[in-house]
Amino acid sequence: MEFVHRSVLLDETIEGLAIKPGGIYLDGTLGGGGHSSVICSRLETGRLIGIDQDAQALAAASVRLEPYQDKVTLVRDNYCNAPAVVRSLGLDGVDGIVLDLGVSSYQLDNAERGFSYRYDTALDMRMDTRQSLTAREIVNDYPERELYRIIRDYGEDQFAKNIAKHIAAARKDKPIETTGELNELIKAAIPARMRANGGHPSKRTFQAIRIECNHELDVLKNSLDELIALLHPGGRICIITFHSLEDRLVKSTFRKKENPCTCPPDFPVCVCGKQSQGKVITRKPVLPKEEELETNSRSKSAKLRIFEKAAADK
Ligand SMILES: C[S@@+](CC[C@H](N)C(=O)[O-])C[C@H]1O[C@@H](n2cnc3c(N)ncnc32)[C@H](O)[C@@H]1O
């Protein structure tokens, strides 16, 4: 299967990285190598480290990045391990980092991966197929209240409670094995008049289960500090999010890094001693332009935020 994925906010991310031809860049969500190939095209003596936990993504990216192979190191890992990966290459840090979160179109379009409600296939949704937790276990083994919380918080589905109830009732008879079976349950849990309005009734629940299956929010939350610490002075991190909870995490972390002071606002001078680690480049998130929104449906909820590490340790 061909790896087809149109990179989201590509020009904006490349511009935001302010690439130095001799710099070291880390793409923590390599995918098909769309962002990485443009980064590589700007490098002279520099280097790109590309990480993805999905073996098929790495295989596709290695073909795409072949013209730059002398500058590229590809690693199958979770980006939460990026600091160890960078150190294992004998490097003390990087000049820029890109995270383009979530799934690729390739993963969604590849029926057997079980990410999409558009195919009837086994419930899987693992980005890293070495992981044991699958969507099947989440759907069949999680307590109903946990399913409700996940579908409500990660899927932002107003019918979360009823969907969780339908799943819990159905699995009493027999395990839910396929995306098709799950689709039917979700459909039954959403009133017909509401189904007619929105997009596909399963969209939100599938997103929620995928986020849970791949621990997407926990990984982001637990990685941001270390990723920022990995930046060389003046280095930039560009993060593209697709979910309001992800965006909120990135926004608040960047703000805290810029202004970590915990002194009461009426203190004349800072006594907490916490120093700024850099500055937020994007006061407001960068959103896709009209043209991109029209031609790439995956860009619809995308938001790019950029942070720049202080020029030198103060
Ligand atoms: C949206 S795609 C990236 C597309 C890429 N920027 C491009 O233009 O081709 C996201 C990729 O990140 C990978 N990914 C998501 N979370 C990850 C994580 N925590 N660690 C490593 N890879 C991850 C997915 O497997 C997927 O291939």
Image (spheres, rainbow, N blue to C red):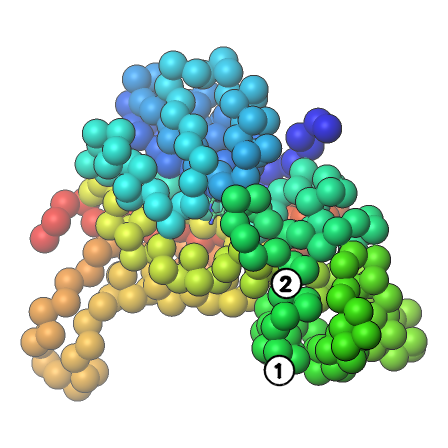
Q: How many marks?
A: 2
Residue 123: give x, y in percent of width and height: 71, 55
Residue 211 appears left or right of 15: right
Whole-percent x and y of residue 165? 74, 81
Q: Quadrant of residue 104?
A: top right
At a point 68% along the width and 67% down the height, the residue shown is 139
Give how far across and how far down residue 82 sits, in percent.
34, 43
75 up-or-down from 285: above or below: above
Nearest the camera: 10 or 72?
Answer: 72
Location of residue 42 (image quadrant): top left
State the image coordinates of residue 69 (x, y, percent, origin top left): 43, 16
Tell me if residue 140 can be seen: yes
Tag on residue 36? none
**Which element carries disc 1, helix, strand or loop?**
helix
Q: Nearer the viewer, mark 1 or mark 2?
A: 2
What residue is at 79 percent from the left and 49 percent from the top? 121
Residue 199 visible in the displayed image: no
**Label 1: few (<14), some or many (≥20) within 10 Å?**
some
- Image point 87% across, 79% down: which residue? 191
Residue of label 1:
145
* Drawn side of residue 200 relative to residue 305, left or right: right
Where is mark 2, residue-wise? 137
Residue 67 versus residue 236 in the image, above or below: above
Question: Closer to the N terminus: mark 1 or mark 2?
Answer: 2
Residue 182 quadrant: bottom right
As shown in the figure, which amino acid type bears the numbered disc 2? Glu
Q: Nearer the viewer, residue 192 or 283?
A: 192
Crowding at mark 2 (Cα within 10 Å: few <14, some 14-19, many 20+): some
